[in-house]
Amino acid sequence: MTTDREFAEKLKNFDREWKDAQPAEEGNYDPVPPGNYDCIVVDAKLTESMSGNIGLNVQFEVLSGELEGRYIYHTFWVTTKNIPYVKRDMGILGYSPNSA
């Protein structure tokens, strides 16, 4: 665990880096308009919320059309309450697990 002193030192270093850094070039971060997109999953990682819920962070890349090359990020939170929504969304994405 990081001590308060170590944390403060990291913040001081960050301040120096902040002052010297140039802003990144402007990009298009507007929400992707509703619609159907041909995408591929380029990354997926399990995550855990601060409250202990399990999630799956997924990164998609749009393969064609006006938004080709754009990335879409979505987290599927797997909780008892969310299971119906996760199943619906995964079905929309074409995932259909084998029945046990």
Image: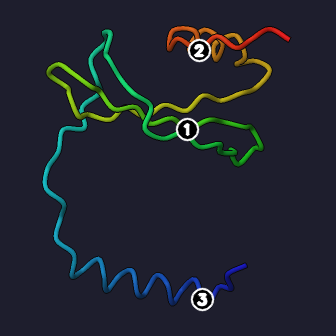
Q: Residue 94 got which mark?
A: none
| Label 2 vs label 1, nearer the camera | 2
The one nearer the camera, 47 or 23, is 47
The image quarter containing residue 55 is top right
Residue visible at 72% across and 16% down in the picture? 83
Q: Is residue 8 left or right of residue 55?
A: left
The one nearer the camera, 4 or 31, is 31
Circle nearer the N terminus (3, 2): 3
Residue receiving disc 3: 6
Tell me which amino acid carries mark 1.
Asn
Q: Residue 57 got which mark?
A: 1
Residue at the extreme right: 100
Circle nearer the N terminus (3, 1): 3
Q: Residue 95 got which mark?
A: 2
At mark 1, the secondary structure is strand
How far apart marks 3 and 1 lie (CA) works out to 30 Å
- For the N terminus, the quadrant is bottom right
At mark 3, the secondary structure is helix
Q: Measuring from the top left, give residue 12's x and y in whole percent.
A: 42, 87
Q: Residues within 10 Å of mark 1 (few under 14, many from 20)?
A: some
Q: Where 24 falls versus 96 (above or below)?
A: below
Residue visible at 75% across and 44% down in the picture? 51
Question: What colour-coding does the image apply?
Answer: rainbow
| Image marks 2 and 1: residues in contact by CB distance under 8 Å | no
| Label 3 vs label 1, nearer the camera | 1
Tell me which amino acid carries mark 2.
Tyr
The one nearer the camera, 66 or 11, is 66
Tell me which amino acid carries mark 3.
Glu
Q: Where 61 falls versus 4 (above or below)?
A: above
Residue visible at 64% across and 17% down in the picture? 86
Circle nearer the N terminus (2, 1): 1
Q: Measuring from the top left, give residue 94's x and y in whole percent.
A: 53, 11
